[in-house]
Image (tube, rainbow, N blue to C red):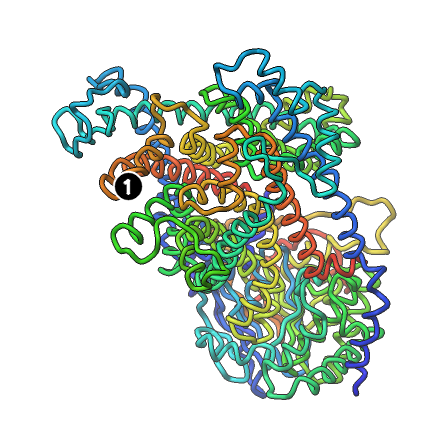
Amino acid sequence: MAVVEAPPVPAADADEAAPRARTWTRGLGVAVPAALLALVAGACFLAPLVLPVPSPTGGNILEAGLPTGSPGHLLGTDPNGNDILSRILYGGQTSLIVAVTVNLLGLAVGGTLGALSGYVGGAADTVIMRLLDVLIAFPSLVLTLAVAQSLGPSLTNTILALGFFSVPAFARISRAATLSLREQPFMAAARLCGTKGWRVLLRHIAPNIAPQLTTFGMLGMGVVIVIEGALSFLGLGIPAPAPSWGNMISQGQASLSATPMLVLWPSLILFVTVLAFNLLGESLRTRWSVR
Amino acid sequence: MTAVAAGRHRGVGGRLFASPSVRLVGKRLLMAVPITLGVSILTFWVLNLIPGNAAQQLLGADATPEQIRAMELQLGLDKPAPLRYLDWLGGAVTGDLGRSLVSGQSVAGQLGERLAVTGELVAMAFVVSLLLAVPVALLAAYHPNRFFDRLSMFVSVTGLSVANYVLALVLVLVFAVRFAVFPAIGFVPLSESVGGNLHSLVLPSAAIGIPMFCLYTRFLRGDLVDQMQGQDYVVTAQAKGVGPWQVLLRHAFRNSSFGLITVVGLNLSTLIGATVIIEQIFALPGLGQLMLQAINTRDMAVVQACVVVFAVVAVLANLLTDLLYAVLDPRIRYGSR
Amino acid sequence: MSVKRDEVLTADPAEPAGAAALLEVRDLRIRFTRGGRRVHAVNGLSYRLDAGQMLAIIGESGSGKSVSARALLGLLPSSAEVSGSARFEGAELVGMPEREIRRRRGRDIAMVFQDPARSLNPTMRIGAQITEAIRAHSGIGRKEADERAVELLKLVRLPAAERRFHEYPHQLSGGMRQRVVIAIALAGEPRLLIADEATTALDVTTQAQIMQLLVELRERLGMAVVMISHDLGLAASYAQHVVVMYAGRAVEYASARRLFGHVRMPYTQALLGAVPLLEREPHAPLPVISGQPPDPAAIPKGCAFRPRCASATGRCEQAPPFSEHEPGHWWACWHPAEDPPGGSGGSGGGGENGATR
């Protein structure tokens, strides 16, 4: 069926820019944030292996409070004499590991739960969704704080606490996508052919809800990085001597007026990373026309 | 009086109770109850993940096992968790949220004032961000892809990527340290000075409100453009010969506003949660600050109460947006044919 | 990719002498640029409409009929490039400044759209949507406008008009909604009403009622109607003149009476063949037009119908002129069909004879 309903009269986009430039920018919309993220991840994970990056902890008190651009300490040092750049890189490792793990957790648990719930429907669906409503009703930061407090600050516990609220969000998206799929004729066809339930889920539903979940995951990466930062900022995330963007900002806050760069450097990298994830998510959303 | 005017007065009384929106309101109210209960159970469970911890933490590391045992008895921690929950719930329903383990004061008594501060902060951030977002989105959508539109989209995508604690510190750096326009920390109660109160809340509410403003602007602008370019009723309105602003305001915005209510509702809990960290940064005596203090002093009763209050407020706020929707949207108000 | 267009049109139906026409469309061309591709939605459309007449524009979806109608009201997205001419009572609509064309919308030319469920604002009361149209062109007060709106609802025979005035679109049935849309269109007392597939979304009974209403309104208000449809049968029953469009071009134009007795263009013939007829044998397969309408971004050279036409020859690679081959009957074809023996329109292959000049 290639009936071309010629220019659908109220054209979907009134973009007057030159058409070639537009497809070109659209490609950039994915490439630029992706490159930025590759740069951030590369710097965080590879640079400490390849370059002589000083240790992020156990700094020399004699080297404390060096300004930006000091020899051997590109971004200077903090009041404990630790190299700021090194702390940013190692802190970035933590942030990215937490963000990826939490989103994979949310995707695996929440995505499956939502798809199952939407596909099976009926009472199971109602029960699962009511339970998720409870979680969604929580201000996520508050719940995460409670969980983190109860478990005690550590990397694993941060991941668990953050996973707690990422699951219902993924489940909700996945369920909505599955529900709209259920109405599609090809689903009925698959069922009429006698395809088994799990096979329908795996072969028909999973690939079709993947774009929505991926887009949501990209936006979720930014959210998780911000909340992990908040946890560490409040002292409930990554415990102190170990670096994290959040606890760096928190430590810097004490001397905000005297040495603002202690706050601004980690803030900047946090912003750039979150922005890149958001832009990537948005570009994927437009490209796959997901809402 | 014309027949037209007469018709307007007829149905009002008769349809009130049979109206679908009343039924919807009832349904939502009924659903809020189990959700609130669920939230409190979940809180209770989360805070008791590691049993016996409370007494240990309260007494510190050098406490003897006997001391801990005594403390557990005193706190009622020897009873099984479900029983303790029921005890707590029984009290909570009658307005007794227990006593602070640290100060021994009634928790409920502490909450009232705190809630007022947090409420004022949220309200200020919310109202200002919404009031700014609507005109900006309308102006942007009036000429899509022109300079103002692109600028507003750039600002909102950027603003959405700034963590609110970073934003708060940058605001402090600029408006309190560099130019001493607003205080960096502290809170002036409303009873003391209205002007001083608002003055002390400008930076905190900006830190919460700016990301919300960006979110609302981006959503509303996108939805308005969708309505203007994709909806037939917009073409009908244009074909009547009415002006472009009227089409945007009376037609597109009216329809987009329902989507906006949904977005507002979905993000209310984020908005409320943001107060925790912002109150901490600006040293505002709100609910979030109380909760963080309680977390640091291991005061479980207070933490429990704070989390539940936060959750109940979020549930109620969601309920309110649902109701608003039901009252405003004629498709719900009058049901479908 | 593009055809040299100047030779396509030797003369056009907008030309005939006589009294000044209400609407004269001449060589209208509309081009869109979408996603890097130039799309030629309308490639030279001409017709003429006298006051109080009903003209049907017939074509498949994508033939450019709706686009050409929206162009008359300046309702195309800004990415559309419109050229050619469309004169309404002598005033040129193509390139008219937005402010001026807005003044004419609803007052000179009004439009009714395909889907009444979507063409009304779901969040506004019926009454407000009509009074808005009334007040857009006259300075009358709110109360007067309300009364006028109820009058209009009665005019389009909406039952219980006073009550409906206060209701919302979703409380009405499809047919009732379309009556409301028509009432809105009538609010500015236009001299031309464009009904863009106005009955397509309705069931057959309602469709007949709405068409009857349009015919009646045309007679009562002396208003001309352009009816846009893919349904040739519908056009035959109600319109005085018919323009058949294919791939953005007019391919046949005649009075309805003449056209259905003497189809010339194989495409029109194929369209007629695709209409189910009672006299056909039961269970006989309906003839369908083979192939698909051309992609408006890649319209074939010469006659655009060539790839689907049974009568096509090498000559069709040159675009046939759209001209008045018989008095009052225009077509664009090198191999026009002959009148069938019975004289009534029907199916059958195109004739193999050359062009009648």
Residue drawn at the location 80% of the way across and 76% of the way down: B9
Circle 1 packing at 10 Å, graded few (<14), some (14-19), many (20+), is many
Q: Position of residue C34 (x, y in %)?
A: 45, 52
Which of the 4 quarters of the picture holds residue C324? bottom right
Residue annotated with mark 1:
A256
Residue C287 versus residue A259 in the image, above or below: below
| Disc 1 secondary structure class | loop
Callout 1: chain: A
Residue B327, position as x, y percentages in the image:
71, 60
Q: Quadrant of the N terminus of chain A?
A: top right
- How many numbered discs sit on the rendered protein? 1
Amino acid at dot 1: Leu
Q: Position of residue C257 (x, y in %)?
A: 73, 72
Vertical arrangement, residue C131 with respect to residue C60, above or below: below
The quadrant of the picture occupied by the C terminus of chain A is top right
Residue B252 position within the rendered picture, expressed as x and y whole percent measured from the top left? 57, 63
Out of B44 and B266, give the one closest to the viewer: B44
**Relative horizontal placement of residue A283, taking residue A272 as reference (left or right):** right
Camera-side residue of A187 and A270: A270
